[in-house]
Image (tube, rainbow, N blue to C red):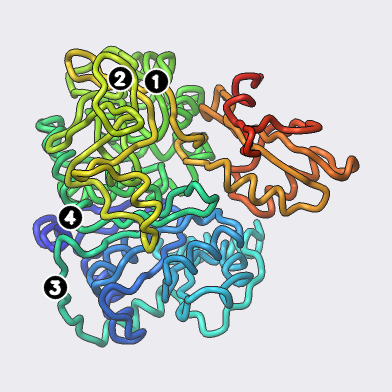
Amino acid sequence: MCEYAFREYAERPAYTNMGTTITYADLDRMSHQFACYLQNTLGLIRGERVAIMLPNLLQYPVALFGIFRAGLVVVNVNPLYTARELRHQLADSGARCIIILENFAHTLDEVIEETTVDHVITTKLGDLLRWPRSMMTNFALEYIKKVVPKFSLPGRVHFRDALERGKASVLRPIELGFADIAFLQYTGGTTGLSKGAMLSHRNMVYNVFQTRAWQGDAFKDIDRIVAITALPLYHIFSLKSNCLLMLSQGGENVLITNPREAQAFVKALSKHPFSYFTGVNTLFATLLNTPGFSNLDFSKLRLCIGGGMAIQEAVARQWHSVTGTPIIQAYGLTETSPAAVINPLEMTEFSGSIGLPIPSTEVRICDDDGNDVVGEAGEICIRGPQVMEGYWQNAAETAAVMLPGGWLRTGDIGRMDEDGFVFIEDRKKDMILVSGFNVYPNEIEGVVVEMDGILEAAAIGIADEKSGEVVKLFVVRTDESVTEDDVIDYCRENLTGYKVPRQIEFRNELPKTNVGKILRRALRSNRD
């Protein structure tokens, strides 16, 4: 699929970021150089894992497709991970190499000796931008804004140097099959440690073409698809729905590096005749409330997909009113590569449904024993070629979510109406969904109880107008001098920002079963 796109769409724009555009021919050339470096200079062999720890920059697709062309496996890493989170993911995946933005290299510096990483490739934010913007951007970030903390990673290689070294060698073709792993995409675990969903080339390619079959002729009157890519490419939603889907169609991804800077985001939108937009509810809501957004030209916009979290009816209606294009609500998981259920394109009114199974996908509503239930709520189970191969080196977790016949337990409680539309009613597992990111209570609790003066902790999700849910933490102290701020500060040191509790409630004891298991359900029933 990649090689076809490089040949077929060579002269088309592939990625644009901060005023610089690279074509598919540029992407072909640079990813080939990077693949040569990985294969010939570093000596990495088929199936070894390479981590990418980058925000939405031009370096991301170059690294991604270079890794594929060298026959290696991509391990996507959230750049905002703390040292504890990064240590686990690198060690668990067995990654031999990492490509990392210098802004986050200090975190790697803390843990690299406890991982399997032998090779570090660093890059600066502006490295692939046009001159002189590249130089000005890098200078400003390092010396004026001072957002690049000091680090020491002896033997590291600069990204641009890696590309240069790759020019002189020849890439040995690697035969990859459908069953070969393309990604280790990490998601939360019941033990508090994230686990790597093994997504094969079969999973990803099928999901791209399943989505294209659902998409039909949505862009029939558009010469070239221009996609706004504000969600991070390391997240499975944007990875498939923007990066790989646009690759297969010769579309252009406009990379938004920091969508939180809403005014700059709107300014970037004004420069591109965008036809495709993906986002989560918080992103749509933020734009709708940013001055200037409603004045943009939406005449080319043909398709908006909302996923990651429930789209609120008020946001959906306002978006449709302002842009003239409805938000099509979709549903999926990391384990389904991710698309599984999407509303039909002809749906223009908000219904609250997550839609119908996409082509080649089956959905069942099951009880706890895996038996079908009809006319009532049960666990949503999914079967299709996009369902993961399993969890990396974790047979127990794999067995816990897979039913006989290849059915995946999603952990979401839903129902199906007589027309086959699926509705989510509740969440079977205790997972908390913050702005489209999965947060698992066990991880937060495991971190907090390591803090001096804390005996027990329990985390739940509470409703939040902006992000859907935020974390609330119930804490039992052994030291009354421990304050809410102390707990939050400790969490900030050890957890990515969206996992940090927004509310702390101290209690003398936590509700438990007769065998001592904390009853989060009881805490949720009394939540604010």
Pick the front one: 168 or 184? 184
Three-letter amino acid code at disc 4?
Arg
Q: Give percent across and percent down for residue 119.
A: 45, 79
* Residue located 39% across and 64% down the image: 128
* Outermost residue, right side: 481
Quarter of the image with the N terminus is: bottom left
Sequence-wise, which precedes: disc 2 or disc 3?
3
Question: Which residue is identified by label 3?
Answer: 175
Question: Which residue is identified by label 1?
Answer: 425
**Residue 415: which numbered mark, if any?**
2
Q: Give percent across and percent down for residue 452.
A: 81, 53
Q: CA distance from mark 4 to mark 2?
A: 29 Å
Q: Quadrant of residue 231?
A: top left
Three-letter amino acid code at disc 1?
Glu
* Residue located 42% across and 66% down the image: 93
Q: CA distance from mark 4 to mark 3?
A: 14 Å
Question: Which residue is identified by label 4?
Answer: 202
